[in-house]
Image: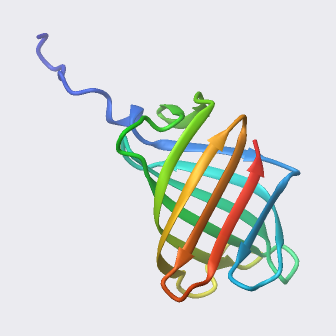
Amino acid sequence: MVAGTSSIADPLQAIGRFETITSKCKYRLGSGSLQTCHVVQMDRKTATVTGVRFIGRGVVHGSSRHLTFVANAPDQTIPLRCISGSCTLKGKRWTATVSSVAESKFDGRGVAEGLPQAWPVNGVCELSLKKLRCKARAMSGEILTGEAQL
């Protein structure tokens, strides 16, 4: 080994964000109405944990709502290739278990409107043929869903 180098893989290879704008995106929080979204983000947190975020418009012009599913897929690799924090979609199929979902709201300046609401859930996120779907059931029985064509 050369002095000053490390045998550990570059930690920036393991984390990062994939983001895309899509015209085919929707999400629903419980019994609320179906909402359209325009941005999908996949945040690679570790080798097995991914945050899947559906971003839509808020009630007030310029504001936004984020619905984030935290997914874990220990038996397979996340379908993202990340370099220096920026990721591209590399996989065609992926399935992960969802353990929690959070909703966040931001005003027109991007400032959070209070703390996120979060729920422990049982669910799944799936990527198949560039279609990303997440569905989870909260302990209260509410169903939370997000779906987008990537």
Residue 135 image-quadrant placement: bottom right
Seen at 57% across and 69% down, the residue is 136
Question: Residue 36: image x %, image y %?
Answer: 84, 66
Question: Residue 54: image x %, image y %?
Answer: 69, 61
Residue in front for this viewpoint, 34 or 124:
124
Q: Give the number of callouts.
A: 0
Residue 143 image-quadrant placement: bottom right
Q: Quadrant of the C terminus?
A: top right
Seen at 59% across and 35% down, the residue is 93
Farthest-out residue, top: 2
User: 138 above or below 150?
Assistant: below
Left or right? Give the position of 84 relative to 86.
left
Question: Residue 37: image x %, image y %?
Answer: 80, 62
User: 35 above or below 142?
Assistant: above
Question: Residue 67: image x %, image y %?
Answer: 64, 69
Seen at 72% across and 63% down, the residue is 55
Farthest-out residue, front: 141
Q: Quadrant of the N terminus?
A: top left
Q: Which color mode does the image show?
A: rainbow
Residue in front for this viewpoint, 6 or 51:
51
Left or right? Give the position of 114 relative to 15.
right
Residue 7 image-quadrant placement: top left
Residue in front for this viewpoint, 21 or 90:
90
User: 24 above or below 129?
Assistant: below
Seen at 40% across and 31% down, the residue is 13
Left or right? Give the position of 20 relative to 3.
right
